[in-house]
Image (cartoon, helix red, strand yellow):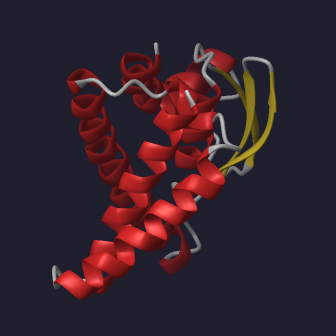
Amino acid sequence: MKIKNQLAIFFVLMIIWILINNSLDLEVLGVGFILSLSLAFIFGRRTNVLDEFKFTPKAFFYTGVYLLVFFWDLVKSNIHVALIVLKPSLPINPGIVKTKTVLKSKMARMILTNSITLTPGTLTVDIEDDILYIHWIDVKSEDIDVATEKIVKKFEKILVKIYG
């Protein structure tokens, strides 16, 4: 499985290289190829987090769907937090809520918790088995099912399709 990790790292690094340099010149691609290949060879043998990713058309499709859902939620959350900052009289109720996840994959859990943390107004504080503790800027409910529905489910339902 290490070759799969190395290939995944290589392709991700190569795409990042192309995006950063904004060039398809042969020299730029050559340097990116050598650097990406070297880093993939060095680090791909030592990582196992990509073992769980399935390189199937379905996984790539739902990864695109996930990114759209994430970016939409990111925009909505940014607007909500900006309104709180611009108008401090808006009532907020910060606190830590307990949520549940059905995800078993380490990679899926990592993506879920990072997505929650990157979304303004929420921060993943701790994980214990299938329980996530999340700091929420405006706690709507301390009930675990309601909090899970409002914070976790929108991401989780797509990640389940990618990681099982």
Instruction: Judge whether 53 appears above or below 9 on screen.
Output: above
Q: Tell which of 82 and 73 is nearer to you.
A: 73
Residue 117 seen by the camera:
no
Q: Quadrant location of the N terminus?
A: top right
Instruction: Please report the residue visible at 36 percent of the width from the left and 17 percent of the height from the top.
Output: 161
Q: Tell which of 16 and 70 is nearer to you.
A: 16
Instruction: Judge whether 155 appears above or below 116 on screen.
Output: above
Question: Is 29 positioned to the left or the right of 70 in the image?
Answer: left
Q: Tell which of 160 and 76 is nearer to you.
A: 160
Question: Is 45 positioned to the left or the right of 1 in the image?
Answer: right
| Residue 43 sits in quarter | bottom right
Question: Is 59 positioned to the left or the right of 2 in the image?
Answer: left
Residue 159 seen by the camera:
yes
- Where's residue 66, x and y in %? 33, 38
| Residue 58 sits in quarter | top left
| Residue 10 sits in quarter | bottom left
Question: Is 83 positioned to the left or the right of 41 in the image?
Answer: left
- Where's residue 23, x and y in %? 19, 84
Instruction: Please report the residue visible at 65 percent of the width from the left and 34 percent of the height from the top.
Output: 48
Q: How many circles with numbers are drawn on the protein?
A: 0
Q: Tell which of 139 and 59 is nearer to you.
A: 59
- Where's residue 89, x and y in %? 58, 70
Instruction: Please report the residue visible at 44 percent of the width from the left and 32 percent of the height from the top.
Output: 155
Instruction: Please report the residue visible at 53 percent of the width from the left and 24 percent of the height from the top.
Output: 52
- Where's residue 31, x and y in %? 37, 80
Instruction: Judge whether 91 appears above or below 2 on screen.
Output: below
